[in-house]
């Protein structure tokens, strides 16, 4: 009788464990579904706003831009295409400089 009760308790524990796992998976599916719906609505709004800007000609045309805007654009394009000032060899050079700290930490030196 004792073996039968252990077996019943084991099956109950296994059933509860599997049930909890499936409930958690179901909750994850629902949460991800909600996130997907929100992301689709947000993306649709962004695309709509971008298309409104293009269709309504709200963006500033180059001919209407001020001289400062044109100069800033020219500098940005120049810096983008001439990005060759930061090329380094990739080699680290470490020179040991004598210091009092080395003598304090290692008296043999």
Image (cartoon, rainbow, N blue to C red):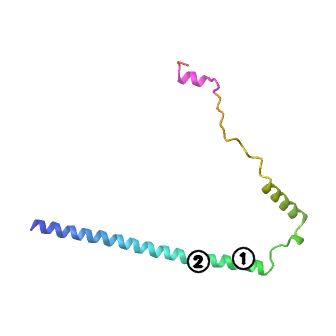
Residue for badge 2: 40
Horizontal relation, residue 16 to residue 68: left or right = left
Horizontal relation, residue 7 to residue 74: left or right = left
| The residue stretch that appears in magenta | 96-106
State the CA–CA distance, disc 1 to disc 2.
15 Å
Where does the C terminus fall, quadrant-wise?
A: top right
Q: Residue at image x 23%, y 71%?
A: 12
Q: Quadrant of residue 2?
A: bottom left
Q: Secondary structure at mark 2?
A: helix
Residue 87: percent from left, percent from top: 73, 45
Residue for badge 1: 50
Q: Secondary structure at mark 1?
A: helix
Whichever of callouts 1 and 2 sits on the residue coming sooner in the sequence is 2
Residues under numbered marks 1 and 2 in contact, where contact means CB atoms less than 8 Å apart: no
Residue 41: percent from left, percent from top: 60, 79
103 part of magenta stretch:
yes
Q: Is residue 85 above or below residue 5?
A: above
């Amino acid at each position: 009788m004792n073996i039968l009760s252990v077996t019943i308790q084991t099956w109950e524990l296994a059933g509860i464990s599997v049930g909890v796992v499936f409930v958690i998976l179901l909750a994850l599916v629902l949460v991800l579904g909600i996130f997907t719906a929100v992301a689709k609505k947000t993306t649709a709004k962004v695309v709509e706003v971008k298309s409104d800007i293009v269709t309504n000609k709200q963006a500033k045309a180059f001919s209407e831009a001020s001289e400062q805007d044109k100069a800033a654009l020219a500098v940005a394009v120049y810096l983008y295409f001439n990005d060759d000032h930061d090329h380094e060899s990739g080699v680290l050079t470490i020179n040991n400089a004598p210091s009092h700290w080395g003598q304090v930490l290692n008296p043999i030196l």
